[in-house]
Image: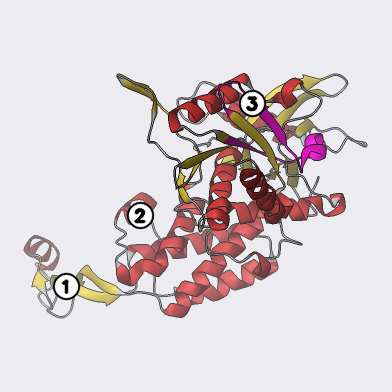
Amino acid sequence: MVNTLKNYYVIKEYDSLVRDISGVLPPNLISIPAKTFDELENFIISHKNDSGADALELMSISSKKGIGKVISAKNYVGLVQMSDGTKIEILPKIYVKDQLQSETITRKIFLTMLKSLKNFAFKSFNNSSLGVMKNNLYEIFIQMFVQEAREVTKRGIRSSYIQHEENEKFYKGKIIFNEHIKRNIVHKERFFVSYDLFSMNRSENRIIKTTLKKLLNLSKDLKNIKDIEQLLISFEMVEESVNYEKDFANIKLDRSMKEYQLLLEWCKLFLLNKSFTTFAGKSVAYALLFPMEKIFEAYMGNVISRHLGSQYKIKLQDKSYHLFDKPKQFSLQPDIVLEINDSVIVMDTKWKLLNSLYSNYGISQGDMYQMYAYSKKYNARKIFLLYPLHDGVTGQIEEGLSFYSNDQVEVYVHFVDLQDINHSLKQISKRMKIDQ
């Protein structure tokens, strides 16, 4: 889908970009300008053998009969901005009942899921206060940053004593003799001195101001621009950062600075491109990208902990066992372990789109071997595999799938409806209790 903003394109996981094709295309194909397509293709190819994040994990290049080359979104969702200003928003493939509102609802669900990520800048935002109905993902990210910056300024911008060196007309602090002699051999009325100055021009505030200035230039949303301009007034006495890495290294978040933490995490996203990726290059200006596998895993751990935490002892990302004990090798790490009395239930999440048309719905043997190992090591008779619900498995939403072995291993496959997570949690709880 092409956004109403110029050079802004929205696609979903597994959808594809094509090179400058006019006319009506299927909904899973989006045409972008030839220059942008070529730059994106070159970026993917140039990163193919990098030691860092593989761009082919983000997108793949293939061809379609009658279409030509296509670039398909894969494992990451979020936002890519090309050097020419073109933005490509990649949304997760989420089952939505109302297809007319699919993009808006998907974006809202995605933002809600992002809040589950640990030590990340999305925890405090309120979906209802954001313009998810009209804004694109990039402007929403800016809006979330502005929201957090406003909270910090309301509480008061922090100042501190900063060592200041200057050639002054007065004596204060201590003289820096080498500089004093070098500069003032003629100017006897001056003193090159070092003294402490109580100022808001500290590293944290310089970083925030620099981020605000950057976003002021990048945002196209009139409300965001107005809000940023108002915030910058509060930072008039603060300089811009000339060395991001140095200023970030100098940050000291003690108790008095606790409210700065989320805001500075946002600054890392915008200034240092610190999302889950290291994608960068001449063609791509920056990327705010997140692996849906990690987001789904964190989100399900969060909602199940809240829903079942009063009944079960819950461990997330448990590392109690290895596949082999002598020596300890091949660590096992299920996403969710629930314990009650002497009973253990293990749950694992998989961000894969299963389909009733595939053999075994497309569940891999590797996943099932993994579940079998969990069952044996944790002495857990019940294993739950949680996949996202989508069009290919909607008929299985209530009952899910069940697999049993003669040595009392039971694996239950459940399809999670992310648009109605409470219903899915009730169904999971029901299956757990019925089969106990």
Q: State which quarter of the image contains the C terminus.
A: top right
Q: Nearer the viewer, mark 3 or mark 1?
A: 3
Q: Position of residue 394 (x, y in %)?
A: 81, 40
Residue type of the residue flagged with mark 3: Tyr
Q: Earlier in the sequence, mark 3 or mark 1?
A: 1
The mark that comes first in sequence, 1 or 2, is: 1
Q: Residues within 10 Å of mark 2 (few under 14, many from 20)?
A: some
State how far apart marks 1 and 2 are (Cα): 23 Å
Q: Is residue 21 left or right of residue 405?
A: right
Q: Earlier in the sequence, mark 2 or mark 3?
A: 2
91 sits to left or right of 31:
left
Counting the numbered discs, the total is 3
| Residue holding disc 1 | 195
Residue on which the image places disc 2: 248
Q: Is residue 167 above or below residue 328?
A: below
Q: Which residues are magenta?
A: 383-409
Q: CA distance from mark 3 to mark 1?
A: 75 Å
Q: Amino acid at mark 1?
A: Tyr
Q: Report if residue 413 lies within the magenta region.
A: no
> Of the residues tagged 2 and 3, which is closer to the observer?
3
Q: Taking 343 as reference, is 378 above or below it?
A: above
Residue at 68%, 60% (x, y): give it. 220
The answer to which of 39 and 104 lies nearer the viewer is 104
Q: In which image quadrant can residue 357 be found?
A: top right
Q: Residue at x 44, y 75 (%)?
A: 236
Element carrying mark 2 = helix
Read off the residue under disc 3.
404
Q: Is residue 178 positioned above or below 272 on the image?
A: below
Residue at (80%, 46%) from the top-left corner? 2
